Image (spheres, grey):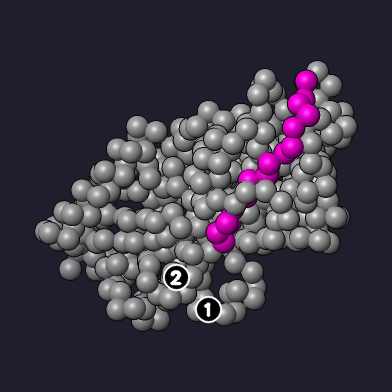
Amino acid sequence: MNRIISSIITVIVALSMVSCGGSSNTNGRKSQELSGSGATFPLPYYNVIFEQFAELNGDAVAYGGIGSGGGIRNLRDGIVDFAASDAFLSDKEMSEMNAVIHVPTCMGAVVLAYNLDGVDELNLSGDVIANIFAGKITKWNDSRIAELNPNVTLPDETIIPAYRSDGSGTTFVFTDYLSKVSEMWAKNFGTGKSVNFPVGQAAKGNPGVAGVIANTKNSIGYIGSEYAFAQKIPYATIENSNGEFVKPSSESISAAASGVIPNDTRCSITNSDAKGAYPISTFTWIVVYKEQNYSDRSKEQAIATIDLLKYILSDEAQKITSEVHYAPLPAKAKELSLNNLKSITYDGVALSETNMSEKSK
């Protein structure tokens, strides 16, 4: 966490330097100030990676973790350079705004974190999780939970589910998983950034849900794995589609992404049938407009945005993922994304490598 705090301070200092001086960056162009908003799921990784980018490239990045839904709204309103989302845009959502591209930045896991006295290890299945959040399993010593945990003494206490109050990509990933493993959930609640959970306590952002779990006995909630690690909150081992009970790790998350990735990178990797896969794994994306001339943005801002995305896709940046409890992108996802970046334009002209030579002018 000290590294994350240091990252935030560095970004603030970098922003001050950009606003006061407008010095040149390492590419020979004027340093830029970029802004983005959205998902809290990858926030610990973004805090680190945006600091590294500022140090290496001279461009400062201000990022607000307001939830995936809020980030997409800000991009639609043209007030940010990029949005971050754990949920890829649907065809309908994409039809309602100017053309965008999705750039995966890393992979991560949604965990079921819990606060249960005397219980250090907990096994859960998809069906049991769905019934807990649907309010159909209400006691910790319910026979369906006990059957999965024969060597654990479960208390006769009421379960308190915790969930997101804001439009959230983490909620999308979690409910996408539940809809795949439970017909009951798919029929009654479905998949979405916002879902009408019938029971429990709501909180804003991954930090908010993590706070509820940490401070509420007998609670359970879904959060990005980094937040459970950072606050030392126990989290469950989840049964995957092969009947294996798996904890999230760089290896088990990567295993979930071993299937085919479409050219636009929009795909779900929850409930993967790969051996050893953690079942609630996901890509997280940065979403940008294909046409970068909007809201009076300059061509240099557009170029800086591409530079940021290329840096995130670099081997150097991807190596950092495992340091903050995420997983690096598979080679195919990076290859597809670098190719998709070539389609980005400014005033209808592709910002190709040839055009980017104008940075020094």
* Residue shown at 72% from the left, 39% from the top: 159
Q: Is residue 358 left or right of residue 96?
A: left
| Residue 310 shows up from this direction | yes
Q: Which residue is at a point 74% across and 48% down the rendered structure image?
A: 133
Q: Earlier in the sequence, mark 2 or mark 1?
A: 2
Q: Where is residue 120 drawn, in percent x and y?
A: 66, 22
Q: Distance between the residues labelled 2 and 1?
A: 9 Å
Look at mark 2 in the image and give the residue it sits on. 75
On the rendered structure, is 31 left or right of 136?
Answer: left
Looking at the picture, how far across and down is residue 203, in whole percent? 55, 51
Which residue is at the front of the view, 2 or 144?
A: 144
Does residue 145 appear left or right of residue 268 in this picture? Answer: right
As drawn, the residue found furthest toward the left would be 21
Alpha-carbon neighbours of circle 1 within 10 Å: few (<14), some, or many (≥20)? few
Which residue lies under the disc numbered 1? 97
Label 1 is placed on what type of residue? Answer: Met
